[in-house]
Image (tube, rainbow, N blue to C red):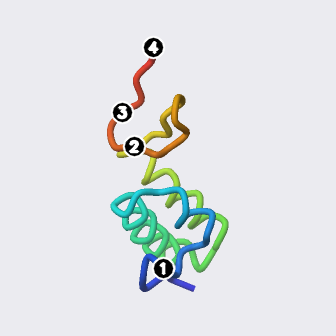
Amino acid sequence: MPYRHRRELPESVREVLPPHAADIYKEAFNAAWEEYGHDEARAHRVAWAAVKRKYHKDERTGKWVEGPATDA
C-alpha cells in the first residue's frame, strides 16, 4: 500500500496539506510501511509526526504552514 504519487494519498491528507508537506507525508509513510512490517496505522502516525516536524497548523486560519508554531 505504499504511495507512489501524492494524488494517491488519502483525501484527508491530500486536501489539507501543502504539496511539500504532502511529499514529506508520503515519503515518511512509505518508509514506516516497510520498517514496521506493513502496519498501516503506525505508518500514518509516523507520517503525521514527520509533517509536524516541519509544519504546523495555523490556529487562526486552520491551514498547515511551514515553520514552528508560534505561541502568542
Q: SS at mark 2?
A: strand
Q: CA distance from mark 4 to mark 1?
A: 35 Å
Q: Between disc 4 and disc 1, whose residue precedes?
A: 1
Q: How many residues crowd mark 2 within 10 Å: few (<14), some (14–19), many (20+)?
A: some
Q: CA distance from mark 4 to mark 2?
A: 16 Å
In this rendering, is residue 28 above or below 66?
below
Name the residue carrying label 3: 68
Judge from the rendering whether residue 57 lies leftward or rightward of residue 54; answer left or right. Answer: right
Q: Residue at x 35, y 46 (%)?
A: 54
Instruction: Say what amino acid the circle numbered 4 marks.
Output: Ala
**Are discs 4 and 3 less than 8 Å apart at CB?**
no
Judge from the rendering whether residue 31 lies leftward or rightward of residue 41; answer left or right. Answer: left
Q: CA distance from mark 1 to mark 3?
A: 26 Å
Q: How many residues crowd mark 1 within 10 Å: few (<14), some (14–19), many (20+)?
A: few
Instruction: Say what amino acid the circle numbered 3 marks.
Output: Pro
Q: Between disc 4 and disc 2, whose residue precedes?
A: 2
Q: Position of residue 51 (x, y in %)?
A: 43, 52
Q: Between disc 1 and disc 3, whose residue precedes?
A: 1
Q: CA distance from mark 4 to mark 3?
A: 12 Å
Q: Quadrant of the N terminus?
A: bottom right
Q: Residue at x 61, y 70 (%)?
A: 11
Mark 4 vs mark 3, foreground winner is: 4
Name the residue carrying label 2: 65
Name the residue carrying label 1: 7
Q: SS at mark 1?
A: helix
Name the residue carrying label 4: 72
Q: CA distance from mark 2 to mark 1?
A: 20 Å
Instruction: Say what amino acid the circle numbered 2 marks.
Output: Val
In this rendering, is residue 23 above or below 55?
below
